[in-house]
Structure formats: C-alpha cells, structure tokens
Amino acid sequence: MEQPLAERMLRAFLIQMMRSEAIDPEDINAAADQLESDGDDEAAHQMRCLILDAAAPSMSEWTADRARARFHTIDGGKSDD
C-alpha cells in the first residue's frame, strides 16, 4: 500500500535536510525515542530508517558510480618506438 502524500513529502524533506546537514541524525534519534516512549514502535523504527536512507546514495548516484566502475582505459596501440 502506498503511503499518503503528506508522509512521502515529509520523508523526502527529512532525508534532504539530513543530507544537507540541516538536521542532525541525533535529532531524528531523539524524535524516535519520543515515539517509542509514546508506544509507537513502528513509527520509531521508520524514523530511524530515515538516517540510513539519508546516508545511502541516491539511485542516480548509485547508477553513475556503477557506470564509472565499468569504464577501463585501453591502450590505443600506439607506441613511442
């Protein structure tokens, strides 16, 4: 089941804020601790997953890194002799 629009937007916003270092991961942990103390373990888990998502490269970065890894220089057959 797809998440509601507001949840998807908030998730993307928080991930971007962590990537730009506007929000510290410890702030996310503190929010997750509060959710746990309120009895919402699922929300706390999802909040902590944001930290991992923010640390992971985006799909386009990952694809570009894979493509760069496949490039190899080849000798063009010219010699200095």
Image (cartoon, helix red, strand yellow):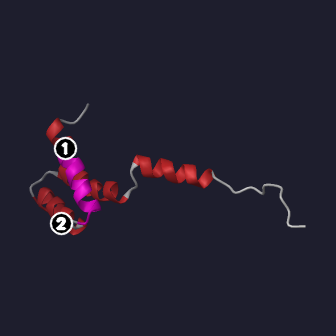
Frontmost residue, 31 versus 61:
61
Q: Position of residue 25 (x, y in %)?
A: 24, 65
Residue drawn at 20 percent across, 54 percent down: 44
Q: Answer yes or no: is residue 42 visible.
A: no
Frontmost residue, 37 versus 57:
57
Q: Residues within 10 Å of mark 1 (few under 14, many from 20)?
A: few
| Residue at the farthest left position | 38
Residue 67 falls inside the magenta stretch = no
Q: Which residues are magenta?
A: 9-21
| Amino acid type, callout 1 | Met
| Amino acid type, callout 2 | Asp
Residue 76 falls in which quadrant of the image?
bottom right
Residue 57 falls in which quadrant of the image?
bottom left
Q: Position of residue 35 (x, y in %)?
A: 13, 56
Q: Position of residue 7 (x, y in %)?
A: 17, 42
Q: Quadrant of the C terminus?
A: bottom right
| Residue at the farthest front position | 81
Is label 2 or label 1 in front? 1
Q: Earlier in the sequence, mark 2 or mark 1?
A: 1
Specify the label residue 73 is tagged with: none
Q: Answer yes or no: is residue 39 visible.
A: yes
Q: Residues within 10 Å of mark 2 (few under 14, many from 20)?
A: few
Pointer 1: what residue? 9
Residue drawn at 62 percent across, 51 percent down: 70
Residue drawn at 12 percent across, 53 percent down: 39
Q: Position of residue 11 (x, y in %)?
A: 22, 48
Pointer 2: what residue? 27
Frontmost residue, 72 versus 16:
72
